[in-house]
Amino acid sequence: MIKGPKGAPDILPDKSKSIRVVIDKIIKIVENFGYKEIILPIFEHSEVFERTVGEDTDIVEKEMYTFFDKSGMKLSLRPEGTAQTVRAYLENNLKTLTHPVKFFYFGPMFRYERPQKGRFRQFFHFGIEALGDEKPELDVEVISISLQILESLGLKDLSVSLNSIGDIEERNVYKEKLKSFLRKRYSELCDDCKKRLEKNPLRILDCKKESCINVTKDAPKIIDYLSNESKNHFEKILSMLDDLKIKYEINNRLVRGLDYYNRTVFEVFSSDLGAQNAVLGGGRYDYLSEYLGGDRVPGVGFAMGVERLIMLLENKNLLPKDEKNIIFISPLSKEYFEEAFKFYINLGKSNFSLYFPYNFKNIKTSISNALKMNIDYMIIYGGDELKNGFIIFKDLIKEEQQLIKIDNLLNFLNNYGGF
């Protein structure tokens, strides 16, 4: 038997339905703030990610699924959505729209890494991106929306960690100071961070290995090397978060793992996810568009791993259920099977969720199967009731049933509740 690829699990109906219910809730919130859906291709020219995410990042060096198509074009399955969104903005000349231009996206991403709890090689991201404005109010909006989403799902033990990593010039100055500090303790770094030291020293601050955490405890802080403009931008964000009573902590080690970030970077944490407890993360990327060959288009956004979010909601017994109930349509006996099937098809045109027993045996078995499937309602079709223009509506929770005139069925269901 051929099995599916490692790290790309099948998402069966019970789980996929939960994901859809959660995503629908999230979409309602972001649409309230003017974000509109963008559907992006699953593969891109590899340079979209190489130029923006960073050639020296783990994603580009180790994790991207890259291939050459029949024309010899180098393509990659998308590992994240921000660079793609900016590429789409530039290519489709969206600078003519009123700014900021706000997008949200949802779909599969791909990274070749060791599968572990809540982390897969094919995984789903939900993200928002706001392009065309560098005001700190937009950073606060994005942080606030991220918390509203998580709180709307019932999560309460949340904390915001944020930092400013400055603009390019001030970050370059800081990198040299950091490299000078780290060279003195080179032997204590892990093998990966030894490779990062000269090309991408900021990533060492993000390393989760204890040896590197100890080395960088006393490292210079990037916030001490910010320009007045960057400091003012960050201080304005903190002031607005205070005004909104949003709790946060400044984390001088937080740099995020992608090269395109500048100024604000943030993560939202939950204590229920253990050591790898970031639920979502994001930040500002005012120069990403220039890496792609376009004019400067400031932007800010966040992305969240949907599987990790679902896992967290499951752990806290907060996973929302589909509010739409299913009606089990059953013939009374085999002689009514074909007629009941036609009734089922026609009722399905009225936007109700239905189930029909194709392997019908008898009404007793239908009731038993409905209970096993956690279906609360039944319509029984047939018998003398049908001859008189009625069907039997059965509430399996209340253990009650009533006769409903077929001509009045839609009105009855629409007013019964739960459909």
Image (spheres, helix red, strand yellow):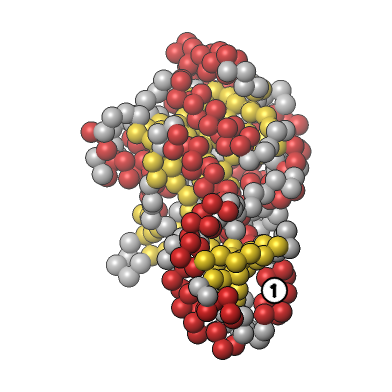
Residue 70 visible, this angle: yes
Foreground residue, 207 or 125?
125
Residue 356 spot, x, y in % from top left = 56, 75
The quadrant in which residue 371 appears is: bottom right
Q: Residue furthest bottom?
A: 335
Left or right of 258: which side holds 314?
Answer: right
- Quadrant of the snapshot with the N terminus: bottom right
**Can residue 178 be seen by looking at this rendering?**
no
Residue appearing at x 56%, y 89% in the figure: 335
Q: Which residue type does callout 1 highlight?
A: Ile
Question: Which residue is at a point 41% across and 20% down the rendered structure image?
Answer: 135
Q: Residue 177 at what x, y percent from top left?
A: 58, 22
* Left or right of residue 377: residue 122: left
Q: Nearer the viewer, residue 361 or 268?
A: 361
Q: Secondary structure at mark 1?
A: helix
164 versus 332 height, above or below: above
Decide: is 361 above or below 234: below
